[in-house]
Amino acid sequence: MSREDELKYTTEHEWIEAADSVATVGITSYAAGKLGDVVYVDLPAVGTVVEAGRVIGEIESTKSVGELYAPVSGTITEVNDAVVDSPELVNSDPLGEGWLVKVEYVELPSLLELAEYTAFTAES
Amino acid sequence: MTIDSVLPAPSPAVGQGTRHPTYGPSAFGRRHIGPDGVEQRRMLSAVGYRSIDELLGAAVPAGIQVGEIDSVIPPAATESEAIAELRALASRNTVRRSMIGLGYHDTITPAVIKRNVLENPSWYTAYTPYQPEISQGRLEALLNFQTMVADLTGLSTANASMLDESTAVVEGMLLARRASKSASPRFVVDSDALPQSAALLAHRAQAVGIELITVDLAREPLPGGDFFGVLIQYPGASGAVWDPSAVIAAAKEAGAVVVVAADLLALTLLTSPGELGADVAVGTSQRFGVPMGFGGPHAGYMAVRAGLERQLPGRLVGVSQDAAGQPAYRLSLQAREQHIRREKATSNICTAQVLLAVMAGMYAVYHGPDGLRWIAQTVHAAARATADELSAAGFEVLTRHFFDTFQVRVDDSDATIARLRGYGILLRRVDETTVGVALDEVSSADPMISSMLAHAFTHDAGAAFGMHGYGAPTREIEPASLRRTSSYLTHPIFNTHHSETGMMRYLKYLADLDYALDRGMIPLGSCTMKLNAATEMEAVSWPEFARIHPFAPAEDVQGYLALIGQLESWLAEVTGYDAVSLQPNAGSQGELAGLLAIRGFHLANGDAQRLVCLIPSSAHGTNAASAVLAGMKVVVVACDELGNVDLDDLHAKIAAHADDLAALMITYPSTHGVYEHEVRAITEAVHDAGGQVYVDGANLNALLGFARFGDFGGDVSHLNLHKTFCIPHGGGGPGVGPVAAKAHLAPFLPGHAQSQRGADEFTGGPVSAAPFGSPSILPISWAYVRMMGADGLREATGAAVLAANYVAVRLSEHYPVLYKGDNGLVAHECILDLRPLTAATGVSVDDVAKRLIDYGFHAPTMSFPVPGTLMVEPTESEDLAEIDRFIDAMVAIKLEADGVAAGEWPLEDNPLRNAPHTAQAIAVDEWAHPYSRELAVYPGAVSSDASVRTMRIRGKYWPPVRRIDQAYGDRNLVCSCPPPEAFA
């Protein structure tokens, strides 16, 4: 199974890798491609309590400013400082080094499987 | 408007239109419109029509075509007649020594800047620097401005100017709200803020649910409870200088963002806002060599501390690098521009005041830090001496510490003001027994000013006028704790060009880097880069228009009021509206004023719930941003595949919002450059549901004389005088965005407490700092209408539509024209669809746009309103030869792209991808590209006429830098002058 298959997705073009009550969150390759050259990433502070569906950060490219939504309610336990320093990581490795935040959660909402997400992007 | 619109004494031509037929030798119309009759016939035959009337009759839907109207616009005047009439109007304004202050101060525009910037088409006819490779000169000039503002305010990053001080204050408030962690809706305002800023804040805060709390911050503590921000005026409107650092610290401790409105000249002597702890500084750069102009235009400013850069509204110039790795300037963070963010916008500021920011920045370059400090010390010394003399004469000076402005107790303010007026001096009336006195660069240059003031105040007819000067500026500003110790303007650029020769050459150097209308066509769709005629520009710098304070008494501005009244009545007529306000100082502000008028109308009718603003998906993004700032909720209406409003979706959205529909905003002709056939059905549907119709006037150049917004259902519109009515773009401002409305909305149009029209003024809240916005550039539009007459305006429209259709027809076999209206015709612009070309060859819109530079053109509008396309607007002013040159260039570029597709050149190494080519790029020993150097740099030098070929080679425009890397600059944000080593 490829990494893409293992991840869960949202309709806000985010991927989630959930393990041991911690969700690692990033944006999908599709979203990174649509955004173009990412130039700036604004992420919440560690310790911030976030609510699923609320805006928690910003991803700015030369074309647009996209909002980062919390895919799950919980507490930010880690943010990717490497991506803050080098926003181009979002383009070069969106599913790996380009991860954005880790959220400690109690319960995961229902998320999309790869096939569902792929179908969703095909529609939009 | 009820103001008396008396025409000046008619010149001999008035009423004798036949004496000056449009194409007569002295008629202005034939100078303004590029193609002559013979050329127009050639263009018509290419398009397939016999006459312009026939063409427009086929293009403009029959249902909206206007019939004969009995025009209030006088028959066309010649250029010399128009100048004579302007002289007559100017003579009805009286220039007195303004000591009113309140953010407007007389200033000496260095003649080298006036002649080489303000009066130089290389600067004033340029467009916003969206094509940075051909805009390096004004981008450097703006970087100078940003560096100057950042240095003086002691903050890390300044933007490339704001519309005026009061809108900058409003933007400061909005920035504070989004940057503050506090969720409170409350914003604290210094009671010593400029009255015009306080008025603007009140109007704008109400629309977006912000609650203002006014506090005398110099004396009272901050209010209890939460608030998200604070505004401090420094020095205050009264002139008072006090140390706000404790207030700032307390406010920040409470989680608020602190905005300081500061006087830039005072900051050469006073501790900067940044050093005092402020997060944001705002204000105006007017007194840095930009005439008061009865209120504008001038460049406002905004600067922020580190960490808030990405919150800055408006335009921000930054440093990036070009394809050769050389430093190069361009607009930063364009993705954050509000029109890109649409309904997510947090501001509707799009444009800046580039020409005026360039002037202010150059004032600092010319004077340098020592010169500015000397000017400030002189102003301060004159103010101190004047206050001392008044004290000695027995008057109570109420302001303890001040820079240039203080208040004086008198028995009767009105009597004092009237008496001083007799001496040619204007004072500020504070209340019945208090007047304000403000010194400036001009008054302080008069060594007799202090004794003259004291003499005028005492009004002892028998007393001798003590002829003594106030001496050298030796005393330092008080309080001592606020004396500035930090340095500023240390960059070499502010310490080099202090001789006039040096300055002249620096300005010439920068101008030569840029491409403006004085070099060739700027076919930017939706921007209407038409002629800005020299005669139209003539009156702008006349003292009777330039040296007038915006709050001067009505008796002193009769010429201005007459000109404004006439222009308002002319604009109302050509748009089919009943009332026009010229106050908005940009198109975006006109939009906001119009939407606020709609909001006011619904509120007055008890329809507070009407908040939904329908906006077609094709609309300019500023529409949505303005709606948000007017407190409305944006609902997007779909467009069909032809680019028109989808009527089914419109009806569905109207039905869904039957109770809360406020307005529809629609652009006509549409942003797609076509006359939408169903516009009447659209406006009627909105009216039937109780909504108001806002018609965006951005494309009025395709309509004047043929149809009127008010006739086909518009309730309110803004116009862009910097498009249709010839005010030059100035490299990205100034603009003027009048708002025009039907009678039922007129009571809600922007008014102003200090308007010289008094009770005759509109009664809505203000949207600009000054009552008439930017009046000193209104003579430009006045002269245009006066010299064209109603017939000439109609002919200009016809010529513009003909030119666009000619381009569309000639280029359609090479590039598909995306949208067309009735009879396959476009309006005044056409969208060339490059997506098939990109799909087939890999050549992008960017490649084509940058390659056009090698051909000697400014690119058309890129990827607006449709990504992957170019929108071309030739305007009526381009000669046929220039239009043909553009068409030839586009055809040649298509062939180059075909060459890439055919494998002649690799996709990553061809004349398009490597464009633009600099001289430096070809001056190399080893030329490593698979095409010739000649093809690289002289692709457009083809003509059957040898003399034309020679001219194109010798007169070629050489871009100074290669293609600029946008992402690099946005990732490494640098927004002040780079050190000289950067260019090593």
Image (cartoon, rainbow, N blue to C red):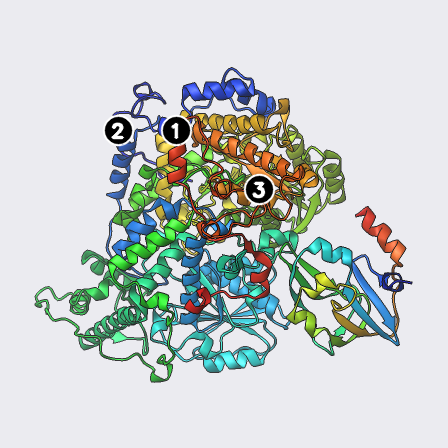
Residue B192 percent coordinates (x, y): 42, 70
SS for callout 1: helix
Q: Total number of numbered labels?
A: 3
Q: Nearer the viewer, residue B873 or B396?
A: B873
Q: Closer to the N terminus: mark 1 or mark 3?
A: 3
Q: Tell me which numbered mark, 2 or 3, is placed earlier along the sequence.
A: 2
Which kind of residue does numbered mark 3 sit on?
Val
Q: Which mark is residue B848?
A: 3
Residue under pointer 1: B946
Residue B833 is at least partly visible in this image: no
Which residue is found at the position 44% from the left and 42% from the top? B722
Q: In this orientation, which residue lies closer to the viewer: B83 or B611?
A: B83
The front one of B400 and B958 is B958
Q: Chain of mark 3?
A: B
Task: Work out whether B326 lies above or below A43.
Answer: above
Residue at the far right in the pictured view: A1
The residue indicated by pointer 2 is B11
**Tag 3 secondary structure:** helix
Residue B420 coordinates in the image, percent (x, y) = 21, 60
